[in-house]
Amino acid sequence: MTGDNVNMYGGSGNTGIQNNRFAQPATEPVSPELREAVRELLRLVGELRGQLPPASARVLDDNLPALTGEADAPPAPEERHRALLAVAGIAATVSAVGEPVIEAVRKVLGLLGAV
């Protein structure tokens, strides 16, 4: 349900409504290098996904919107960071097979200035 939600408690002759609308903060442009690093990470995650148990694959799937920006709103930096660490954690459980994903996560974190 969308729209205004108005509650009045007591008083008489209440008229009018005040709407506080705030502009969304401007998002910083994504560098081509970061865009390519995320694209490569997603490719590697796709390859890794088929080698994981179903529960681990679901964790990857749950974190993809924060990596790709496909969520309803752009992910907060903390959410993106959390998702990257979750993906790296899953990749670490499969040893050498997951190493390319871990390296890709490190690269993305570096480009975001998070390492």
Image (tube, rainbow, N blue to C red):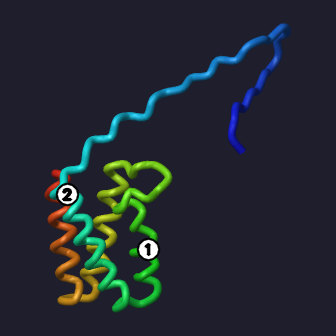
Residue occupying the point 23% across, 84% down: 98
Image position, residue 66 (x, y; %) = 39, 60
Front-lying residue, 80 or 26: 26
Give residue 34's mark. Answer: 2
Q: Quadrant of the N terminus?
A: top right
Q: Which quadrant holds residue 64? A: bottom left
Q: Are the residues flagged by discs 2 and 1 in contact, CB closer than 8 Å?
A: no
- 113 to the left or right of 67: left
Rendered residue at 41%/82% (across/down):
56
**Percent from the top left, x then y, of residue 21?**
54, 26
Mark 1 neighbour density, 10 Å: few (under 14) some (14–19) many (20 or more): some
Q: Which mark is residue 32?
A: none
* Residue 95 sits in quarter: bottom left
Does residue 115 show up? Answer: no
Q: Is residue 30 visible?
A: yes
Residue at 42% of width from left, 82% of height from top? 57
Residue at the limit of the structure toward the top, as seen here:
13
Disc 1: which residue: 61
Front disc: 2 or 1: 2
Mark 2 surroundings: few (<14), some (14-19) or many (≥20) residues within 10 A:
some
Q: Exactly how many numbered labels are in the figure?
A: 2
Depth check: 91 or 42 in front? Answer: 42
- In this rendering, the answer to whether 51 lies above or below 81 is below
Residue 15 placement, left or right of 36: right
Residue type at tag 1: Asp
Residue at screen point 74% across, 27% down: 6
